[in-house]
Image (cartoon, grey):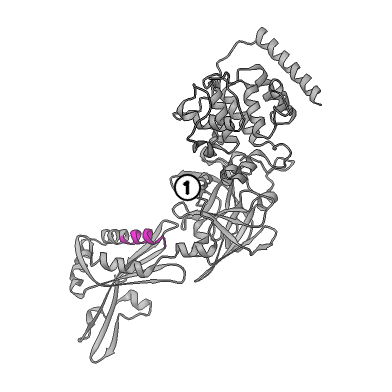
Amino acid sequence: MYRKRKFVGMIFLLIAVFLCSNFLSAPAFAAKYQDYAERLAKINVFRGTGGSFDLEREPTRLEGLVMLIRLLGAEEEASRITVFTFPFEDVPNWGKGYVQYAYENGLTKGVSKTKFGSNNLIDAKSYLTFLLRALGYSDQHGDFSWKEATEFALEKGIISESLYFELSSQTFLRDHMAKTSYDALNAYRKGSENRLIDYLVQKGSIDPIKAQAVFAGGNRKDDAGELDFESLMQACVYLEVETKGGSKSGSGFYIDQRGTIVTNYHVIDKAQKIRIINSNGSAYTGEVTIKGYDKDLDIAILSIEKKNGAFLPLGDSSSIKVGQPIYAIGSPLGLANTVSEGIISGIRTTGIQITAPISPGSSGGALINKNGEVIGITYAAMHGGENLGFAIPIEKIFEVNTDLNLTVAEFLAKETPDLKQFKERLLRQYQAITLNGKKIGLEDIHVSAGESGIVFIEFFMFERDLEAYLEAEVVGRDSLLADFSQLAYSFSKDLSANVFLQLSLLTETSRYPYAFDENDILAELNLSPITYIGNNTWLVYFPFVYVYVNTYNNVYYHGFWFS
């Protein structure tokens, strides 16, 4: 087989020489493998300068060596080297760690006793030799030779026949370096069932979530070219979350075969226990690890100990366009693996706007493109608007720190605000508030936690400042609400929680407080602002204005308790 492939390779080479010498002029080179360079850049393997990958340029020998060190997962180790014993005089400071590592480990030699050849150009055979070494093959122990490195890479299926043709007939460029490096990462190491990228993940050199994105684009279509929704749904899960205030549910999906699940942060917020229901109805009740989360992005990345088969390939949400068809897979109202269809109706700073219906329980679900790739995480529906949903671009998961690895109990402890400490801070900081330019003194502040995770904050004004408050209302209720809402937003951000903020009056009087007797709003709620507490004393509890802030959907409700 090897000789046969070598013969085919020679035929390709002869054809190439004939075409180039007789028919083809030399066109200006245009990079073919930009996409592969961008994918490798996500895992910090391939880098450029000044916002460009310089794909049209021939790479140097030192650049090739740097790629070898990265593909061995040894860049961090090389960067820590401070003692240099190699004899070469032409290695720049930035490259000394790489060369020293290679010199110590017998990975490369110089072009002479005193020259490494840092700026010498590297050809396809030399670079493929580096890649083959990264895959565990040895030219020193007879696996292959430098002269036949290209043929050997073809024989082992590391490069395709079309790429073999290019490498044999064209000048080796950084463009080819990107493509061959990509192919090597997806190739199996010598004598192993693990690909090179799997080895680097296991070694800890590459984040597993970012590694999955490198080979994103696996399409899930059946023989007729239609999306195979059965296959897609197998990668989706239903989450049951227990909190102190009760239970809630959400959606999620696997992004690899190691049990990594993506969902929304607000789905697991305040969780005391998380139960994963797979598409076949089987429940995982074992240990759930919160690998990482970001409250502002509303993303959580979980991990379970049980391996899974199906997962969703990651797509590219940066290239989406309005009008493109999409599919949302989630568990609205607990109805697992519900598929809804729609289009991208807008691309907003808040996320991807879609027409596919999003209902409670769908939060954390997968937004799928026509190729079966996940391009977003569904998180919200705009109430009052028909077919108006939103999803978080999938690229945002790469901004999440996935090194936390918390148990559910550790996560809850980390995210539970210390309300006693918070109240003490408010008492020190807010002796008064200003609404519409009117200063209103505060006699007391109450802070408590609601069962659903809402933090209730109530400001009690001094009775002497009631007139100042009423004057603030006269100036304008809208602007008063704006001032009060800013306070609620700041408290919500400090606590990372939903907040209900209210301003009230609580006072005792020896005369019946007729001024507070009539209130249509409180009457509808069957509440009375006046309570007789004995000894010819009446207690007046009168709420004036309130604001409720929902941190996850960026919405708030507000109003006044009297008209």
Q: Residue at 47% of width from left, 69% of height from top?
A: 452
Q: Give the quarter of the figure containing the N terminus.
A: top right
Q: Position of residue 420 (x, y in %)?
A: 36, 70
Tell me the crowding category of disc 1: few under 14, some 14 to 19, or many 20 or more residues within 10 angstroms, Cα based: some
The image shows residue 534, relative to residue 466, as above or below, that is: below
Label 1: state its secondary structure.
Answer: strand
The image shows residue 396, relative to residue 412, as above or below, that is: above
Q: Residue furthest bottom?
A: 535
Q: Position of residue 540 (x, y in %)?
A: 27, 80
Examine the rendering and report whether any part of residue 299 can be seen.
no
Instruction: Compare residues 522 and 446 and report the one nearer the observer.
Output: 446
Q: Amino acid at mark 1?
A: Gly
The span shown in magenta is 487-497
Whether the magenta-drawn stretch holds residue 425 is answered as no
Residue 562 located left or right of residue 204: left
Q: Residue at 53% of width from left, 49% of height from top?
A: 355
The number of discs equals 1
Instruction: Compare residues 86 and 222 and report the one nearer the observer.
Output: 86
The image shows residue 136, relative to residue 256, as above or below, that is: above
Q: Position of residue 352 (x, y in %)?
A: 50, 46
- Asked where in the image residue 24 lies, by quadrant, the reply is top right
**Magenta stretch, overall SS:** helix
Residue 207 located left or right of residue 441: right
The image shows residue 387, relative to residue 135, as above or below, that is: below
Q: Position of residue 120 (x, y in %)?
A: 54, 19
Q: Residue at 50% of width from left, 36% of height from top?
A: 81
Instruction: Compare residues 246 and 94 and report the one nearer the observer.
Output: 94
Q: Which residue is mark 1?
A: 351
- Asked where in the image residue 463 lies, by quadrant, the reply is bottom left
